[in-house]
Image (cartoon, rainbow, N blue to C red):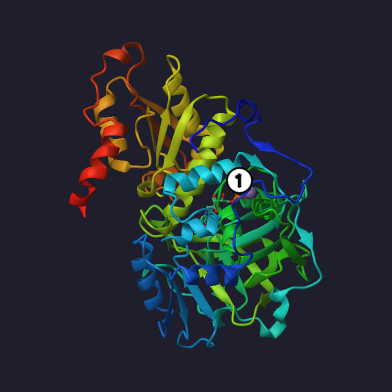
Amino acid sequence: MNDKLSSIDAMANPMGSVASGADQAPSRPGFEIPYTDLREWIAQADKLGEIRIVKGATWQEEIGMAAELVQHDENAPCVIFDEVPGCQKGHRVLTNFFGGRRKNMTLGFPLEFSKLELSEAFLDNYMRELKPIPHEVVETGPIFENILTGKDIDITQFPTPIWHDADGGRYIGTGSYNITMDPDEKWINVGTYRVMIHDKTSVGFYMSPGKHGRIHRDKYQARNEPMPVVIVVGGDPLQFLVACSEMPYGICELDIAGGLRGKAVKVVKGKFTGLPIPANAEMVLEGFVQPGKRRLEGPFGEWTGYYGSDIREEPVLDIQAIYHRNDPIIMGCPPQRPPEEQARYRAVTRSALIRKNIAAAGVPDVTAVWAHEVGGSRMLLGVSIKQRYAGHSKQAGHVAAMCHAGAYAGKYVIVVDEDIDVSNLEELMWAMLTRSDPASGIDIITKTWSTPLDPRIPPEQKEAGDNTNSRAIIDACRPWHWRDKFPKVNMPSPETARKAMAKFGYLLR
Ligand SMILES: Cc1cc2nc3c(=O)[nH]c(=O)nc-3n(C[C@H](O)[C@H](O)[C@H](O)COP(=O)(O)O)c2cc1C
Ligand SMILES: [Mn+2]
């Protein structure tokens, strides 16, 4: 699984290689994603014994409290909240989908894979060559079981929690995705951006500068035209994982999810916007963002572990229709202080994407990448390489810091030799402490892509509209020109370690 990316891939453009032609055969002989929607996913996770149902918890306080607890424990179950006081029985909220052994099931890989193996399998089987399969329009689907329009629209009736006690509102969109179209280039984007309820018929959402949905929105605003939007607030977990990952610009994430599954995603057309809506989604909001219309949004407990960006004016979605299945399930993935659930799944997907991006930039012999959970899978990257030439480690570090999947909101990149397991935080730190020289081994890049959510950007800089931060690239490889003189590591060889485990492993249990 550790084999190198092919030289063909290394020479591909930085967007990654994208095969066209959309043949329907999955590229992963032997692996299969065992569900096509959230309900089938729940049935699979239940088979693993990893689903718990909680009845009677309140949306005002208790669901948020419980979510915080389970999301911080990677072996905790997925929890589905039902019979939420004040809400209809059967209208549910699901949290902590990505944990335990179900995370492997979610990606269609063997349950015994480690997180690094999971990420590498994701890279090898899905990401190395993206093979999008165009989504397929069908007449109808379960999402049209209930259609609420006009006076019937009331988004406040569903069990949307207050996730963190100082949140500025009820966030219905956390495990959600927004579907929009580029008004010039006409391509469809699917991206996860937090969504807060304003009142019965409107919600607000926050998109950081540079995100694809934000680029679409800025274009509509510049044209002074309403932007059609569809928001899926519960649906296929695989689609969600694709929607919240930095996929290439210009490619529809519905088609990427179809490609991963080897089967086109079936969509119905929104009755007001004509935008594609996954036919088996749980709940969907459809409407328009009027140019210039804004309302206060936030604060919201964010992935950095802070209430990110204060309450500010953000665009508003006026809801024209709510579609939902019978007994709909809202998917909740509220960010918490890392490491937590969100960091767990993003580590798996982002580490793979960064590795792909580095190879696409032509850097050879990257042996592993890990986007560490403690940094929300953005702020601390570990990269291991098999050093081939002087300057190789700096090159790998700078590309990791600046490639598409690694650039946004990064802080520290540590480059180490291939003997280090970069997914093991203590091992990575040990390598940094013993193989880097602070005076000569740290490069700083300034004015880099970040976000108003970054807690360390000074207020006066944010007010001036400058949300950039800086990066440190720490070269913790054995110095190239005297690598042979570097003291030997005093750990046993892999062979001795295996023997020790076989003979004395019982002492650990
Ligand atoms: C649970 C969750 C919530 C997120 N919320 C936001 C958000 O509010 N605003 C934002 O710009 N990005 C948010 N993101 C990150 C984006 O989903 C991610 O950058 C994605 O790549 C955006 O899609 P795009 O690349 O098509 O723009 C969130 C991610 C997750 C997992
Ligand atoms: Mn996108």
Does residue 38 show up?
yes
The three-letter code of the residue at mark 1 reads: Tyr
Q: How far from the left and from the top, in percent, is residue 157?
A: 55, 83
Q: Which residue is most to the front?
A: 503
**Left or right: where 396 falls relative to 436:** right
**Left or right: where 45 falls relative to 225:** left
| Front residue of 366 and 354 | 366
Q: Residues within 10 Å of mark 1 (few under 14, many from 20)?
A: many
Q: Which residue is most to the top?
A: 481
Q: Is residue 354 above or below residue 362?
A: below
Disc 1 under 8 Å from ligand 1? The reply is no
Q: How far from the left and from the top, in percent, is residue 507?
A: 18, 50
Q: State the quadrant of the C terminus.
A: bottom left
| Front residue of 220 and 118 | 118
Q: Secondary structure at mark 1?
A: helix
- The image quadrant that residue 78 belongs to is bottom left
Q: How far from the left and from the top, in percent, is residue 274?
A: 79, 64
Q: How many marks?
A: 1
**Left or right: where 396 falls relative to 69:** right
* Residue at horizontal 40 percent and vertical 44 percent from the top: 460
Does residue 147 show up?
no
Circle 1 residue: 126
Q: Is residue 181 above or below residue 294?
A: above
Q: How far from the left and from the top, in percent, is residue 488?
A: 24, 22
| Front residue of 19 and 400 | 19
- The image quadrant that residue 456 belongs to is top left
* Residue at horizontal 68 percent and vertical 76 percent from the top: 323
Q: Which residue is most to the right?
A: 139
